[in-house]
Amino acid sequence: MNLSIRDAKEEDMAQVLALVQELADFEKELDAVEVNLTDLKEHGFGNNPLFHCFVAENEQSIVGIALVYPRYSTWKGPVIHLEDLIVTQSMRGKGVGSALLDEVVKYGESLGVKRISWEVLDWNEPAITFYESKGARIMRDWDVVQLDENGIQNYLNNLS
């Protein structure tokens, strides 16, 4: 294997989107992907980038990504959120995820963040085992809370 990890480029976004869709399929949520190629290019490489993305490349093909963005913790200060660490199915178990996570941790340290956080589905035992083997703490006493686009509108419509 000839693996390299590098910062994503705008022209990588089609392959990044394909990996996002592969993950959504794995998670049985394929219809939930609303982001498109134009969004990824604008949001990652426009005037005010919203995320930073690393790609894992093997034989000139992108086989994994790690997408992060800045957050702020009222307890800790600057932190980053790892939105997704995706490795294409055929490359899992070959060190790609470790190489990507290594790069995310180095990136976070270079920014001086106090924490790197992310979520993992409670049924994804291989991912949980992987993260725990890297020293990550799985906080099972916290629940993820979200308002989707409809939830936001319903919330606003019900303000008195």
Image (cartoon, rainbow, N blue to C red):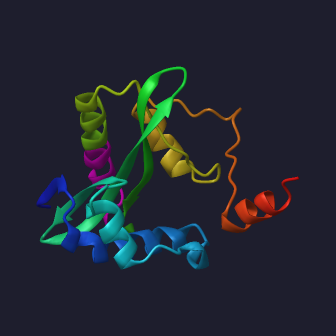
User: In the shown orientation, is residue 16 left or right of residue 148?
Assistant: left
Q: Quadrant of residue 94?
A: bottom left
At a point 28% along the width and 72% down the height, the residue shown is: 13
Q: Is residue 158 visible?
A: yes
Question: Which region shows up in magenta?
Answer: 90-101
138 up-or-down from 28: above or below: above
At a point 24% along the width and 59% down the height, the residue shown is: 55
User: In the shown orientation, is residue 6 left or right of residue 121?
Assistant: left
Q: Quadrant of residue 159?
A: bottom right
At a point 27% along the width and 31% down the height, the residue shown is: 111
Work out whether residue 75 or residue 125 is closer to the camera in this orientation and state it.
Answer: 75
Residue 145 pos. (x, y %): 70, 47
Magenta span has 99?
Answer: yes
Residue 85 pos. (x, y %): 40, 54
**Quadrant, the N terminus:** bottom left
Q: Residue furthest front?
A: 160
Residue 9 pos. (x, y %): 19, 64
Residue 137 pos. (x, y %): 52, 29
At a point 48% along the width and 67% down the height, the residue shown is: 23
Magenta span has 125?
Answer: no
User: In the shown orientation, is residue 64 left or right of residue 59?
Assistant: right
128 up-or-down from 52: above or below: above
Considering the whole magenta stretch, tell me its main secondary structure: helix
Work out whether residue 76 or residue 86 is closer to the camera in this orientation and state it.
Answer: 76
Q: Is residue 90 visible?
A: no
User: In the shown orientation, is residue 86 left or right of residue 11?
Assistant: right
Exactly how many numbered labels are in the figure? 0
